[in-house]
Image (tube, rainbow, N blue to C red):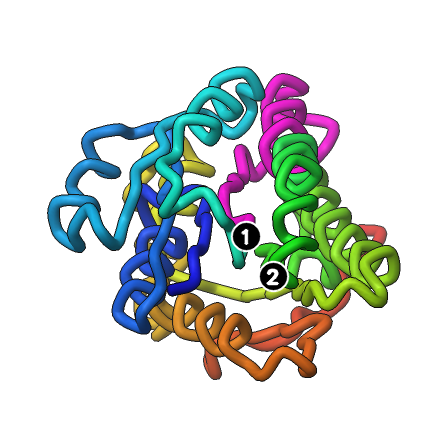
């Protein structure tokens, strides 16, 4: 049985990915900060299928302690899903909170590369796979996207760099770049603003966490000689934005 480690598994895409992979016959190490949600996943899906590892991805000591304590059945990671990440704020750069920027960089960039570095030896040994969750924001800038888009552009480029460096090892690496997905994303970004959440997703028929989880499963279960380098996906209701033009009065 193959084993996946999924970060950010307490909600949204990460939680859906754990469920989807377990349904497809994988074991999963589910990580996140909210222990009660991880415990609920273990209870729902069974301790033979899911092992909870409670830590904040930005806390390297806590992460290492949790991963070093994994039972043998879950220690051999065949698939790393770097899903944990967040956006904070929608203000223009000149009006943004620097602390929010640093949290996004620490979570979306530093924690992702640190965990990847830690698991590379076992992934190489097992000829495993890495799926990094980037975003269409990596490719298409928008007002208020500033540092969030920059972090996701890093994830995309880091993925391509990993592909180059892991050449010949048999390890597959993919950047998945979704557009609009209805999760807790906007609630987190706006500090719990339910009105902003509804304004963004209402009537748009956005993608679901399950849609992205199924995409991750598909990528992970392709034959070992196939690699999806990057995969961009949007709901049919979403497409590319027009350019902004500032005009003199």
Depth check, front residue: 101 or 142: 101
Q: Magenta region: which residues?
A: 82-109
Q: Residue at x 84, y 67 (%)?
A: 168
10 Å crowding of disc 1: few (<14), some (14-19), many (20+): many
**SS type, badge 2:** loop
Name, please, the residue furthest toward the left: 43
Compared to residue 89, the image places residue 223 above or below, namely below
Q: Which label sits in the foreground, 2 or 1?
A: 2
Q: Is residue 144 above or below residue 95?
A: below
22 falls in the magenta region: no
Residue 30 quadrant: top left
**Residues at discs 2 and 1 in contact (Cβ within 8 Å):** yes
Decide if residue 22 is on the left or right side of residue 152. left
Q: Which mark is residue 80?
A: 1
Q: At which x and y percent is residue 127? A: 65, 63
Residue 175 pos. (x, y %): 66, 63
Say above or below: 221 vs 212.
Answer: below
Numbered tag placed on residue 128 in the rendering: 2
């Amino acid at each position: 049985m193959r084993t996946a480690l999924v970060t950010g598994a307490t909600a949204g895409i990460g939680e859906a990915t754990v469920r989807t992979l377990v349904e497809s016959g994988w074991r999963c190490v589910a990580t996140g900060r909210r222990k009660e949600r991880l415990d609920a996943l273990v209870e729902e899906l069974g301790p033979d299928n899911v092992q909870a590892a409670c830590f904040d991805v930005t806390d390297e000591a806590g992460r290492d302690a949790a991963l070093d304590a994994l039972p043998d059945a879950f220690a051999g990671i065949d698939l790393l899903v770097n899903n944990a990440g967040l956006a904070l704020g929608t203000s223009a750069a000149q009006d943004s909170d620097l602390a929010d920027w640093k949290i996004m960089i620490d979570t979306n960039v530093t924690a992702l590369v640190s965990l990847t570095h830690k698991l590379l030896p076992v992934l190489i040994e097992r000829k495993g796979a890495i799926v990094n969750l980037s975003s269409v924001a990596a490719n298409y800038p928008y007002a208020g996207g500033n540092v969030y888009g920059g972090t996701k552009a890093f994830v995309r480029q880091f993925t391509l760099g990993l592909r180059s460096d892991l050449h010949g090892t048999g390890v597959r690496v993919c950047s998945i770049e979704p557009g609009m997905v209805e999760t807790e994303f906007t609630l987190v970004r706006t500090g719990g603003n339910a009105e902003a959440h509804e304004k963004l997703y209402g009537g748009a028929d956005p993608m679901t966490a399950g849609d992205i989880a199924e995409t991750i499963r598909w990528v992970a279960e392709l034959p070992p000689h196939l690699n999806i380098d990057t995969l961009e996906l949007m709901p049919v209701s979403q497409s590319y934005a027009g350019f902004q033009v500032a005009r003199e009065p």
